[in-house]
Image: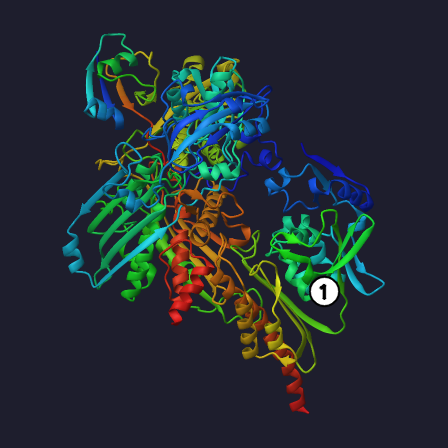
Amino acid sequence: MLNFLRLSSLADVSEMLWADGPVSALIAGGTDLLVRPERLASARILIDISNLTELGGIGVTPDGDLRIGAAVTHQEIADDDTVRRHAHLLAQACAQVGSVQIRNRGTLGGNLANASPAGDSIPALLCLEARVALVARERGRAVPINEFFVGPAKTVMQVDELIESVRIPLRRGRWVSFFEKAGQRKGMCCSKASVAFLAQRHGDRRLTGVRVALGAVAPTAIRVPAAEAALEGQVLTLERARAAAEACREAARAIDDIRSTRDYRREAVSALLLQGLLPLYDRMRALARPRRRSRRRR
Amino acid sequence: MKVTVELFGPQRERAGQGRLVLELPAGATVADAIRGAGLVDRVDLWVLVDGRRATRDSALADGARLTFFSPVGGG
Amino acid sequence: MDKTPSVVGARVKRIDAEDKVAGRTLYPSDKTLPGMLWVEVVRAAHPHARIREIDVKPALEVPGVVRVLTHRDVPGENAFGIQIQDMPVLCFDRVRYLGDAVALVGAETRQAAREGARRVRVDYEVLEPITDPEAAMAPGAVALHPKGNIMHQGHFEKGDLAAGFACCAVIVENDYSVPMIDHAFLETEAGISYYDEHGRLTVDACGQYIYRDQTQIARALGLPLHQVRVMAPIVGGAFGGKDEVTVQIHLALMTFHTQRPCRMVATREESIVSHTKRHPVKMSYKTGADRQGNLLCVQARFVADTGAYASLGGPVLNVMMEHAAGPYRVPNVKVDGYAVYTNNGFSGAFRGFGCTQACVGLESQMDLMAAALRLDPLKFREQNVLHKGDLAGLGYPMTCEVGAGRTVRSAQRGALYRSRRRRAPAKPATPSLKPYLRRGVGVATQMQGLGLGIGIPDYAEVGLDLRPDGTLQLRAGTNEIGQGAYTAYLQILSGRLGVPLSRLSMVGADTALTPDSGTTTASRTIFAVGKAVELAAEKLERVLGERAERAFGWAPGPARLQGDQLAGSGGRRPLRELLGDEELSVQAVFHVPVAEREMGDGLPHRFYSFGTHVAEVEVNTLTGEIAVTAVEAHLDGGKVISRTGFEGQSEGGIAQGIGYALMEEVRLEGGRFLTTNFHTYVIPTSLDVPEDLRTVPVEVREPEGPYGAKGISETAMVGVTPAVLNAIADALGVRFFRLPVRAEDVLAALQEKKT
């Protein structure tokens, strides 16, 4: 018998988890949980947290973070102006999760708690250097996203903890970003490989603060320092883009499974980074051109 | 009276031929025709009389055209 | 000249649309009855094993479990199967695939039934699964059935192949491999069973032929036909996957033993493991043409993995062989086919019915030959295509109307084909530079036999009831499986009687109410049942005329309905004056004409539909991903009855054809399924189907069909897959011989090309 509970406050949920954490499952959008009957079967209490106001909302905190509540849906994130302004990459990634139906139900907190190596929001959050705010009865902590995941479906969360929100430090300057993924079809599928990219763009066409993260090619999403180094402080050229792509291929520790192969995933992360960088390369050259032309005219 | 029987598939195999002419007493039914053809009646032996599905007790008229077959097709 | 009434060929709203959209339609999985038991199946734990012992006691101890049935409880023949009854209702000595049913558990709740099913103890002696058809065919292989593992084979030869090849300027020889795929119907196998008010054991469950299901149930339960009633008016999709019996006998058996209503609904996992599939086939094609581009030789060999049981595997192989040379004039043909038993699930009917697989091989060959001869692919097809009176591949004359050439010419005129020389994508997703996208356009021409062929009578009977108020009810025994045929029947009826659709209604698929209209398969319903509807309409007017002649003294001749009035030679009279309060019912039957000469194995067909598909793809050479960006379907299904239904069949067929080409594959390892749900068995969604879809009717009227109509449901799908394959080859200069073509395959092939 499964008990379904909807509680009125985060404090009540924390109490509940403290007492019955091992036999409880949290549900917000349900897009991961409901399709896995075996996980439902192991729980005796299902706690619906989708209604908790404490887990909702998108805003900027007094200490200068973008805060996104754990129960905010992917679609809300994709559509939100504040997110688009301060963490465009996350909006780009969330806009590509599943399908319209999944994006309308699935939540950011759920994507993190599920801890799939292929979770689409995770590479973006890695690039954005987000922190995951966890709460439990009488305690709380903020875990840097790169320390949050331990392995497939495994996080550092204790049995009585839940995700309250995701915090993303605000950035100054002009940033460029993209999220690219490959799947077995165009939507409604688990990514075979994904790439998130973030960099600050300067007037002289140099990129700094370059962040590259990969999904679905390792037990957890990973950053690729070698790819970042290949582009950091440089003007984007096709050679550098190819070098960064090559670094992604080298960094991928992919596996063969029902959805794809190790070899393909390694190729794909390289291809996806290139696919994202090519239009950026184009755009930055285009931005540069008129200035050159006007100079000539003078 | 005389009736003709066309046979298909397993029924043809069992009867050993594709076409029979049966001499039956007046008032004979489909069941009599099956016996007359030397076939063991089975639930999957379907019978058409003059092109329409008939039951075992359907009375036959002289010159009736019977079809014996089993629904072994699809697609 | 054309006196076709406007309702025929029109875009009309489907008669079932509103109820379906509003959620009022009850599908088999929606139905419940008071006091019913849930039935769960204990399926095989191994793909191949001997059963030593079945212990049901632990299941009976589960609270709520009412009855557990095993092979001992099958009162009639413990065997079923459309063609050969080689499949046990409940296994007794051996299991041959993972979907095999070993026991049934009936319980008060689904949970109890599942728990009971979990606790049935089956002691197995595990046997090595036979998973390779070629190995299964080899002498000395362990036999899965008494007659050996070659379930069915066919051999055909025409002309002189050696002499033919000697005259060829180009000979192309390749092996192709197509995977097992699932029908992925939306509603899993489901239904209810009960004793009706007349004491008939009634099964209201998904299916594609109520009368054949009634026979299969009666045979297994040892009951006379009239004690079994089967209904299945509305089914949540089938595509051939519900042609064979699924839940029907199990439901009947549990109700028979418990005297209680019962319900079954398969989970997706159970569905994928248990029902028939599209045959995986390994094929070899060797084809040749002379310098002028005349196709001279087609040699094909098919090895179809039919899995554990026969079902319709034999007929599928026959149709594959029949269509091995496609819609072309070929003087020299040799075809060898084998359908082989293995422990890989089991395969049977699926949209296209064998033609699908052959078309993948042959249409690839056609493109390769055209390229070798430096001929335009459509010109090459047009040059060789069959015309009325020509001899088809297997040597029989085409006596039906043949629109193959017209579909080719229609495709030649289409915008998509005319754009094929443009190499760069026409409309990349963003305006930015995407040099890594390659565009290609491919074609495929195809024909597909209509109906059941010549092996057994193919007939359709319908009933028509006229009420005194002038409204009419059509009764037909075929199913509404999503294809929209019921609407088309009423369009035909409306057209023939001049009665508006709003005054017509439809009763479908109930052995107690509807005549035997035959199977809901083989692209046949609009042709066969539609023709019977036409005949019934004519008969009704004739009968009305005769009665008006007797009652009113009108001159002999048919009478017409006009609202609640009857019109004839004597003017107009209220229908009620003739009928009183009685209904007037007529029945009509249509027998599908057959070919003049039988070739054995139910071949050939007499009627065929034709089609030419043009597909455009964009291949991403960085990631290997393939997007189908446009498809044009030029389809000859004779006169179109329902334009909406015609386009629906075409667009659905395009989606399914894309799935077969690019993503679908039921994967097995040692007879065990790796892809048991839609998480791992991936089918296209609307995002994978291009917005740019054009369906062009090429209406070559077939005089034998209603208003000249033929069926289209299979032709709409079959050509899509090879057209996509040919488009990929056009885009990359690399050809794939194995389906599905995934991004993984594309990248691997591109790398190989580079080195």
Q: Is residue C660 left or right of residue B6?
A: right
> Which residue is found at the position 48% from the left and 25% from the top?
C104
Judge by depth and name the residue closer to the eye, C456 or C308.
C308
Report the amino acid beneath label 1: Ala
Q: Which of the chains bears the disc numbered 1?
A: A
Residue A184 against residue C453 in the figure, above or below: below
- State the SS at label 1: loop
Q: Position of residue C537 (x, y in %)?
A: 42, 27
Q: Position of residue C44 (x, y in %)?
A: 44, 34
Judge by depth and name the residue closer to the eye, C416 or C413.
C416
Q: Quadrant of residue C128?
A: top left
Q: Kindly tell me whether residue C510 is visible in this rendering.
A: no
Q: Kindly tell me whether residue C143 is visible in this rendering.
A: yes
Count how many numbered circles sit on residues in the image: 1
Q: Residue furthest right?
A: A62
Q: Position of residue A66 (x, y in %)?
A: 78, 62
Residue C147 against residue A111 in the figure, above or below: above
> Which residue is found at the position 29% from the left and 42% from the top?
C136
Q: Quadrant of residue B7?
A: top left
Judge by depth and name the residue closer to the eye, A35 or C449.
A35
> Which residue is found at the position 37% from the left and 21% from the top?
C219
Name the residue that disc number 1 marks. Answer: A87
- Quadrant containing the C terminus of chain A is bottom right
Judge by depth and name the residue closer to the eye, A77 or C390.
A77
- Quadrant containing the N terminus of chain A is top right
Q: Position of residue C529 (x, y in %)?
A: 40, 31
Q: Is residue C76 left or right of residue A150?
A: left
Q: Quadrant of residue A230?
A: bottom right
Q: Is residue C321 left or right of residue C344?
A: left
